[in-house]
Image (cartoon, helix red, strand yellow):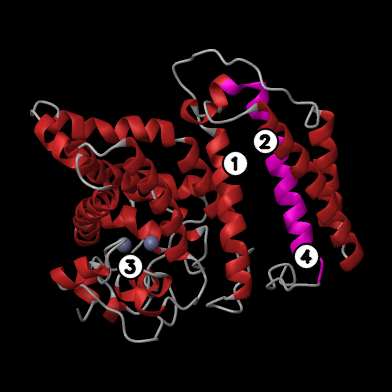
Amino acid sequence: MKKQNKRMRVGEGRISGAISIFLGSLSLTSILCFKFPEQLTTPEFREVYTADMVENLMFGAIIATFLFALVSILLNKNKSNAVIGIILGVLAIAVGGLTVEGRAVEKVSWSIGLDWLILDLFIMALLFVPIELAFPKNKLQSKFHDEWRTDLIYFGISHLAIQLFGVLTKKPAVAFFGWMNLEQVHEWVSGLPFVIELFLALLVTDIFQYWTHRFFHSHHYLWRFHSIHHSTQNMDWLAGSRTHFIDIFFTRSMSYIPLYVLGFSTLTFNVYIVFIAIHAVLIHSNTSINFGILKYIITTPQYHHWHHCEEPEHYGNNFAVVFPFIDKIFGTYYLPGKEWPKGTGLIDASFPKGFVKQLAFPFTKSPFKNDLLPEEKSKR
Ligand SMILES: [Zn+2]
Ligand SMILES: [Zn+2]
C-alpha cells in the first residue's frame, strides 16, 4: 500500500499505466453518451459536436489507451495497470467505440451532462497533471494520496448535478430581482466593450462570493459545511472539488445574483464560466509555479493555499477567489513574500472519510472539539 502511494516519476511506467486506465475509463464512459444522448449529454454542447469530431476523438482515445498500456508494460515490472488499461480499451471496442455514429437527438426535459464531466476531467487532467509533475509545491505528495477517490467523486457529482444546480441556484436571484425592470441596466452592460464587461462580471461575482464565503467562516452551523472544503491535507487539482452541496448551492446562488441583475451577454457568461472553472482548479493545485507580479493582481495557488493553511494564527484570510485587492479592501489579505503555509487542513477537527458520510455528517454533527470559529483562533 505504501509503495503504491509513492509519488510517480517519469520513466517508471506508472504514469503511462495511469494514463492508459484514465483514457480507457473515459472512452468507455463516452460510449454511454452515444447510447443515451438524450439523458446523458448537455443540450448546449450537442449543437457544437460534429459526428466526425466525436468519431476521431473516440478513435484517438482508444488507440492512446493501448499505446500508453504498451509503454507501461515496457517500463514497469508491475503489469497490472497496463492490463487494466488494455481490458478497458478492449471493452470500449467491444461495446462499439470504433463504430460509433452520431444520430438525431430527441428533446427531453432533463439530462445530467456526463459529456461535460468527461470533457472537463480530460482537459483539467491534461492541463494540470503535467504542471503538478513538473513544478510541484509539495514534492512528496502523490496523485494517489489517501483521499483522491473521495475528491474524484466530488468532482464527478458536482459536474453531473450541474444542470440541476444551474436551475436551482438561479431561482433565488430570479425570485428577488425578477420583478424589477432591469432592461436599462442590461442595455448599459451590453454596450460595454467585451473586456470591461468580463472584468465587471468577475469583479461583482467575486465581491458577492467573498461575503458569502466569509459568512460561511463566521457562523458555527455554516462553518461545519464549509470546513469540509478545508479538510483536505493534500492540495491538488482535484482538491477544490471537495465542497459540500449546501456550500455550492449558497455560494453559487449568491454569485448568480449580479450575473442575473446585470444581464451579461452569452459570450461574457461563457468566457466567465470557462475562466472560473480553470482558475478554481489552478488555485488549489499542487504547484509552486512562479506568477511574478501577476500574483498581486490575480489569486494564485500560494494565495489560496494560505486560505487553506493549517496554522490557526493565519485562519480567516484570503477569501477572494479571483482578485486579491478585495481582501486588501476588507482587511483579510495575507501573502508573506515567497512563503507558503507549512501544511493545509484543519488540525483540530476530525472528519468522516468518504463522500456519502461527509454529505450527511455536518447536518447533525460538528467535526470540531471546541466551538471556536476559525477567526476566533486567528491573529488576524
Ligand atoms: Zn474557506
Ligand atoms: Zn479552496
Q: Earlier in the sequence, mark 2 or mark 1?
A: 2
Q: Which of marks 3 and 1 is nearer the N terminus?
A: 1
Question: Do the numbered discs 3 and 4 sit on residues whose CB atoms are within 8 Å?
Answer: no
Q: Position of residue 353 (x, y in %)?
A: 51, 56
Q: Which residue is drawn at 43% across and 60% down?
A: 351
Label 3 crowd (10 A; few <14 / some 14-19 / many >=20):
some
Q: Main secondary structure of the magenta part?
A: helix
Question: Do the numbered discs 3 and 1 sit on residues whose CB atoms are within 8 Å?
Answer: no
Label 4 crowd (10 A; few <14 / some 14-19 / many >=20):
many
In the image, what residue type sits under mark 3? Ile
Horizontal side of 237 relative to 260 (left or right) equals right
Q: Which of marks 3 and 4 is nearer the N terminus?
A: 4
Q: What element carries label 1?
A: helix
Q: Label 3 belongs to which residue?
A: 298
Instruction: From the viewer's side, name the closer residue of 366 and 192.
Output: 192
Q: Label 2 belongs to which residue?
A: 29
Q: Label 4 belongs to which residue?
A: 14
Q: Earlier in the sequence, mark 4 or mark 1?
A: 4
